[in-house]
Image (spheres, grey):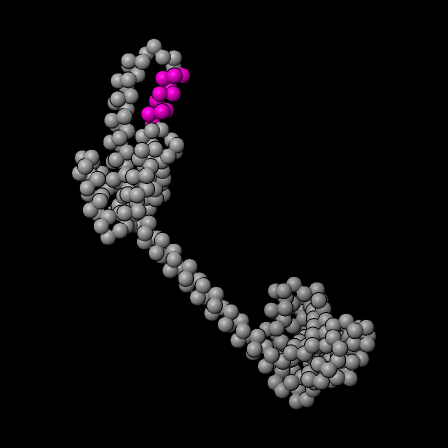
Amino acid sequence: QTVLVVGAGEMAELAVEQLMRTGIRRLVIANRSYSTAVGLAERFQGTAQPFERLPELLAEADIVISSTGARGFILTRDMVRQAMRARRGKSMFFIDIAVPRDVDPAVNELSNVYRYDVDDLQSVAEANLKEREREAQAAQAVVEQEIERYLRWVEALGAVPIVRALREHFSGVSEQELEKALAQLRHLAPQDQARVQRLVRTLVNKLLHTPSMRLKQITSADDGRIHAEALTRLFDLRPAAPAADEGESAENEGGGDGQVLHLPLGGTKS
């Protein structure tokens, strides 16, 4: 859009800065002091025009932002009506941020002309503030949810050494028995022996999958330590504490269908 800024003071400068961020097509600045208008226009790749050309400049502007120190209206209903004739009814938006007002409120009576002043902007600001407050509440809920999730994850770290020890125990026993069995099945073809190996290892994974997942869940419960200790004694396990630099995944914690169950190992020792 083509934007006409009337005035070159601090408020006008702030308005221009915001406009440039939106990617306007053309910026025109008109001010009683032409040299001031030139200085502001050069900073923002706009063009400066003499204040006396204001009536004809209106016809070229899609958006007019006015912020002068005038004591009366500098943009009257008649001026805007003439501009709308030249524009053949194409819409115009006036944003009056001057105090007192620069734009005659009567321009709102013209078809396709929309005028907003400081009071209108204040209501928009209040609506935006309420929206940000709602978004902040939603963000707070997400933060609290993630904190709870993280705490559960930290508590579940206590299951990692036990799950690993449990898998090592089962894997050790199965590998020993597998070795004995393969010694007696030497008559089998190599591919058949490989199938037996996959069968045994997949079976161990499937058997350990559900206990491993349940152990992760109960470790974070109030009585989780009791269950973990019972499991440790039941299978005579010797779980080792995870190293601080083991990273994000613990391999071989028991997964279904021959898959490895990955458990987070963060940098926290349980």
The N terminus lies in which quarter of the figure?
bottom right
Classify 57 as above or below 137.
below
> Is 253 part of what is drawn in magenta?
no
Residue 136 in the figure: left or right of residue 150: right
Q: Is residue 81 visible?
A: yes
Q: Which residues are magenta?
A: 191-201
What's the residue at 34%, 33% (across, down)?
A: 206
Which of the 4 quarters of the picture holds residue 62?
bottom right
What's the residue at 24%, 31% (across, down)?
A: 169
Q: Is residue 247 visible?
A: no
What's the residue at 25%, 40% (across, down)?
A: 162
Residue 266 in the figure: left or right of residue 49: left
Residue in front for this viewpoint, 197 or 75: 197
The spot of residue 20 in percent (x, y) is: 63, 66
Number of marks? 0
Classify 69 as above or below 216.
below
